[in-house]
């Protein structure tokens, strides 16, 4: 049986394709020094804060994994993200 009614009070978390969101995170870090510094010092906070008024749409396990990355350079951060994707 199909339900034609939607509960608009209930917020649904939208999860975008992982590769696209990872690319958005790295792109934001390349163009914005403040976001890059936050991403390198506290990736979990950076991911939750989003960038440019937009949230990153990641699955919970992807957010947790990115939050555990420890890197001193954006290149190192990107390499660790790449290893996670593979």
Image (spheres, rainbow, N blue to C red):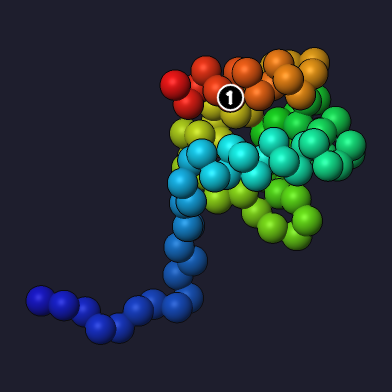
Observer-nearest of 63 and 81: 81
Per the image, the residue denoted by label 1 is 81
Q: Position of residue 29 (x, y in %)?
A: 78, 37
Asked if residue 85 is positioned above or below residue 59 in the image, the reply reads above
Q: Which image quadrant for residue 71?
A: top right
Residue sitting at x 75%, y 50% = 51
Residue sitting at x 45%, y 70% = 10
Residue sitting at x 73%, y 20% = 75
Asked if residue 1 is positioned above or below residue 51 in the image, the reply reads below
Which quadrant of the rendered structure holds the N terminus? bottom left
The answer, for residue 50, to whether it is visible in the render is yes
In the displayed structure image, the side of residue 50 where residue 59 appears, left or right: left
The answer, for residue 68, to whether it is visible in the render is no
Q: Residues within 10 Å of mark 1 (few under 14, many from 20)?
A: some
In the displayed structure image, the side of residue 4 where residue 17 appears, left or right: right
Q: Position of residue 7 (x, y in %)?
A: 39, 77
As drawn, the residue found furthest toward the bottom would be: 4
Q: Position of residue 9 (x, y in %)?
A: 48, 76
Residue sitting at x 50%, y 22% = 84
């Amino acid at each position: 049986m199909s339900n034609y009614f939607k509960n608009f009070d209930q917020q649904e978390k939208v999860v975008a394709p992982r590769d696209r969101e990872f690319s958005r995170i790295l792109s934001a870090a390349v163009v914005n020094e403040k976001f890059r510094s936050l991403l390198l010092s506290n990736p979990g906070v950076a991911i939750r804060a989003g960038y440019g008024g937009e949230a990153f749409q990641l699955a919970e396990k992807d957010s947790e994994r990115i939050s555990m990355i420890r890197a001193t350079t954006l290149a190192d951060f990107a390499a660790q993200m790449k290893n996670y994707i593979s």
